[in-house]
Image (tube, rainbow, N blue to C red):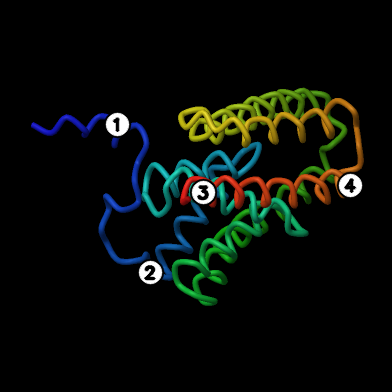
Amino acid sequence: MSTDSAPAAQEPDRAAAGGPPPSLAALFVAFARMSLAGFGGVLVFARRAIVEQHRWMTADEFNETFALCHFLPGPNIVNLSMVFGARLRGIAGGIAAFAGLLLPPTLIMTVLAIVYARFGDVEVLRRILAGISCAAVGLLIAVVFRMMTPLLKRMDAVALILMLGVFLAIGVLRLPLQAVLLVAIPVSVGATFFLRRKVAA
């Protein structure tokens, strides 16, 4: 019996699947399921589906792709659907993932908006929404720790220092996001390039 089956189950490898890229219909259905399950945010369910369930990406690939999408204008998860779909199936794949992500919740939210406009002042509904917001924060914290796992496993000191620096600059010092990114992105790219050249030498 192979001894490396347990680690593979804990951190799925895209290469282990060995299958062809998903069809356009599979991309649409996968992202539709993510959006319909994504109460409090789709990122948690997107990572679970892409990395753990379908194994379309490794954990590192997901982090790198999400980092790129995070720095682009617009909602992060929407950017991720376009970039991810296009990466696997070209422009058509990006459109399929994008449509799957937005179409079902748009229809549902249109109906809910009509209901909320009529019953939004009901106290019971306000309490329910307050409880949902707490669950959303918990989901976000959970996915942050999951995305940190590859960095912690590699003990990448430079990446951890940069991550902590950005957190302190934005979360504690409340510096403008654009100013922090203008500094953090060149420093991150330069440090990675320098370290890889050093290792190659």
User: Against 146, is 179 above or below?
Assistant: below
Q: Residue furthest left?
A: 1
Dot 2 or dot 1, earlier in sequence: 1
What is the three-letter code of the residue carrying label 2? Ser
CA gap, disc 2 and disc 3: 19 Å
Dot 3 or dot 1, earlier in sequence: 1
Where disc 4 sits, the SS reads helix
What is the three-letter code of the residue carrying label 1? Pro
Residue ID at (42%, 47%)? 58
* Residue at the spot of label 3: 62
Where disc 3 sits, the SS reads helix
* Residue at the spot of label 4: 179
* Residue at the spot of label 1: 7
Where disc 1 sits, the SS reads helix
User: Against 47, is 19 above or below?
Assistant: below
Where disc 2 sits, the SS reads loop
The reply to whether dot 2 and dot 3 touch (C-beta < 8 Å) is no
The reply to whether dot 2 and dot 4 touch (C-beta < 8 Å) is no
Between 141 and 108, the residue placed more toward the observer is 141
Residues packed near mark 3 inside 10 Å, few (<14), some (14 to 19) or many (20 plus): some
Residue ID at (64%, 49%)? 67
Residue ID at (69%, 34%)? 163
* Residue at the spot of label 2: 23
CA gap, disc 3 and disc 4: 25 Å
CA gap, disc 2 and disc 4: 40 Å
Residue ID at (59%, 43%)? 43
